[in-house]
Amino acid sequence: MKHPQIYLERLMPVDVTENYVNWLNDTDINRYLESRFVKHDIESVKLYVEAMTISDNNFLFCKSFTVNLSIFFLIKS
């Protein structure tokens, strides 16, 4: 999906950054997520994203904005 200010693209292991891992570990951000029970590091998140990229039933997407902000989400079938 493309829009002048919003892009929806598949999340790949190379897209995982320390910034994203810090966001994922933030208790204010993840308080309602199942991921809140685990302390994540860059390697564990890259492995998870890699597993999702080879899955036929799960898809991770990154919604990026032209203002340098990204939102990640998972679609499971």
Image: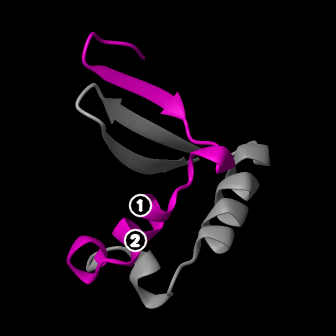
For residue 19, the mark is 1
Q: Are marks 2 and 1 in contact (CB under 8 Å)?
A: yes
Specify the segment rendered in magenta: 1-30
Occupied quadrant, residue 50:
bottom right
Q: Is residue 17 visible?
A: yes
Residue located 25% across and 71% down the image: 29
Q: Secondary structure at mark 2?
A: helix
Classify 24 as above or below 3: below
Horizontal and vertical percent for residue 34? Answer: 42, 77
Classify 22 as above or below 15: below
Residue designated by label 2:
22
Residue located 64% across and 43% down the image: 12
Q: Is residue 58 visible?
A: no
Residue 17 belongs to magenta span: yes
User: Looking at the image, which is closer to me, 32 or 22?
Assistant: 22
Residue most extreme to the right: 54
The amino acid on which the numbered mark 2 sits, given as a three-letter code, is: Asn
